[in-house]
Amino acid sequence: MEWNLIFFINSIMLGVGLAMDAFSVSVADGLKESRMPKSKSLAIGVSFGGFQALMPLAGYVFVHTIITVFKMFEKAVPWIALVLLVYLGIKMILEGRKSDSSEENKIKELTFKTIILQGIAVSIDALSVGFTFAEYTLLQVLVSVAIIAVLTFFISLAGILIGQKIGNKFSGKAQIFGGIILIAIGLEIFLTGILK
């Protein structure tokens, strides 16, 4: 692959495409925690952007080293994303129902563990993107994944802001809606991966 405008356009389009799952989960996070501190919003953006960069990089390494192992693992990717996102979605729905039924049971804040799990779940399908980097030099791969990371970071922050605006209007119901979004994303990743 040559260093040209097409390389950068491809990287940007790839970054935007990969960031859509992160955007949707960020909206759900904003719904869940409408008064999220800026530091946590940044942590979500860094987690999502970081994992969206690491997964294609890992795919690139697999392509050039242990391709047969990755081929076996590739079939598990949709299942892993489905399990993680359905788990997180059900947890949000249950917490939303509790907050509706009891005033003293306020919406729980997102934990660091949940943010990391979400980062893995929304980016695990990006492992296979590393295959598209097979003809890239290592420097081109690093530039491309940096573009993906930066785009995902900002798109995730936008998702959180949108979720917070909606969440302020719908309070407890917003958390249930956020959980449904996570489950829907998990199903979409699963079905896309299975039907490939």
Image (tube, rainbow, N blue to C red):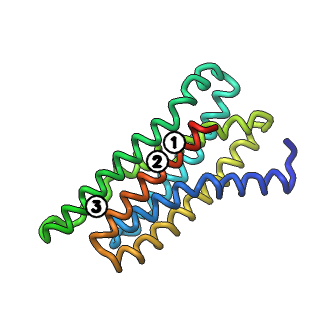
Give coordinates of residue 82: x percent, y percent: 44, 42
* SS of the residue under disc 1: helix
* Amino acid type at image mark 3: Glu
Q: Residues within 10 Å of mark 1 (few under 14, many from 20)?
A: many
* Amino acid type at image mark 1: Phe
The reply to whether residue 40 is in sight is no
- Point out the frontmost of discs 1 and 3: 1
CA gap, disc 2 and disc 1: 6 Å
Looking at the image, which residue is at 52% across and 35% down?
A: 77
Reply above or below: 171 against 55. Answer: below
* Amino acid type at image mark 2: Gly
Looking at the image, which residue is at 20% across and 68% down?
A: 100
Q: Are marks 2 and 1 in contact (CB under 8 Å)?
A: yes
* SS of the residue under disc 2: helix
Looking at the image, which residue is at 53% across and 41% down?
A: 124
Q: Quadrant of the C terminus?
A: top right
Give coordinates of residue 1: x percent, y percent: 85, 41
Q: Are marks 1 and 3 in contact (CB under 8 Å)?
A: no
Q: Is residue 92 left or right of residue 123?
A: left
Q: Which residue is mark 3?
A: 109
Q: Which residue is mark 1?
A: 190
Q: Residues within 10 Å of mark 3 (few under 14, many from 20)?
A: some
Q: Which residue is mark 2?
A: 186
Q: Nearer the viewer, residue 107 or 152?
A: 107
